[in-house]
Image: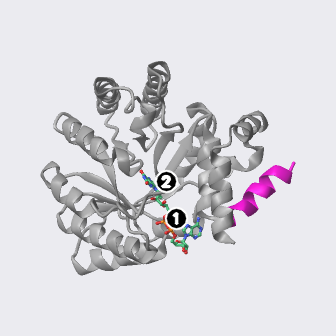
Amino acid sequence: MEAISKRFFLYLSHNKAFDRMAKRWGSRFGANKIVGGETFSQAIPLITQLNEEGFQVTVDHLGEFVNSAELAKENVQQCIQSIHAIAYHQLDTEVSVKLTSLGLDISHDLIMEHMRLILSKAKESGITVTIDMEDSSRCHTILEVYKTLRREYDNLGTVVQSYLYRSEEDIDGLYEFAPYLRLVKGAYKESSKVAFPEKQRVDENLKRLIKKQLLNGHYTAIASHDEAMIDYTIGLVKEHNIPNDRFEFQMLYGMRNQLQSDLVKKGYTVRIYLPYGEDWYGYFMRRLAERPANVAFALKGIFSK
Ligand code: FDA
């Protein structure tokens, strides 16, 4: 049943007619429970509230796989505007970016130019930028872009996915950059040629990567809603006397709210990943596919006045 539901929502995530309809109906689909708004300005009150509740935030302008330079430029402008607003409103938030939305698939020069613009603006305001990791066909290129830019900017992090066989070697290859890494299980549909097909192996590998990155002494963001990963991290940092300012937990906005608050109360840093933008439909459907239990609040959103 879960597999059928997953396939159904992944199918919907690509459906253009539903996308258009969703945009017309706006957030009545329940998307406002997991998306910060259609513009950065709409997300500001929510970020302020999250900061007041003790959470740190990373914002992500929704959109990916752009193949026109104009659209990529527009996305860069959106990102830079959000950086100005973060600085102006003194929000405690970082910025996450997907390189495919900024021109990765168009040309190497374009993505480097766009990222340098974003990183320079962010650096002026002391804001860290994290490059999200996308599907495995782009992993090598994204890490190469990260390495080049990391030599120029210290306000840059990226993501490693534990479902990929290559990830442990990737962490070894990044060691010299003392990287700020977000460690995740991985969200894309991948073949068994490149990724562990069994969830247990993905989980075991995530634990291995968390241990490696933390014991390397590099700042680690554990981005998971899985209590087994959180408990493992807490046990590990206690065992090795790793202070709380060397790691943080990250979760998606609207997922496991109680767990997020409990961790803050226990004194841990929790960063909420808050997406915003008009392209919320695909993101929303992928989250429903990941966890069909979320359908309940979507239905509530549609039918409540
Ligand atoms: P997983 O889906 O494996 O679930 C494990 C267990 O956790 C479940 O059995 C359940 O007990 C519990 N659980 C999970 N979600 C729950 C919920 N909503 N409510 C209640 N219980 C729940 N991926 C990627 O490929 N590139 C990226 O750049 C990023 N970036 C990113 C940032 C942040 C902040 C997060 C949290 C995640 C990502 N991801 C990502 C997504 C990531 O790869 C992964 O797909 C999802 O986080 C789901 O995996 P989990 O580890 O959260 O739990």
Is there a contact, CB below 8 Å, between mark 2 and mark 1?
Answer: yes
- Tell me residue 97's x, y (percent): 41, 39
Residue labelled 2 has its Cβ within 8 Å of some atom of ligand 1: yes
The residue labelled by disc 1 is: 260
Q: Is residue 32 left or right of residue 94?
A: right
Classify residue 115 by image quadrant: top left
Front in this rendered view, residue 271 or 200: 200
Q: Residue 45 appears at what percent x and percent y? A: 60, 40
In the image, residue 137 above or below residue 89? below
At label 1, the amino acid type is Gln
Q: Does the magenta stretch include residue 141?
A: no
Name the amino acid type tagged 2.
Answer: Ile
Tell me if 202 is positioned left or right of 265 in this view.
left
118 or 290: which is nearer to us?
290
| Mark with earlier residue (2, 1) | 1
Q: In this picture, which residue range is highlighted in magenta?
A: 293-305
Residue identifier under label 2: 272
Question: Tag 2, which secondary structure?
Answer: strand
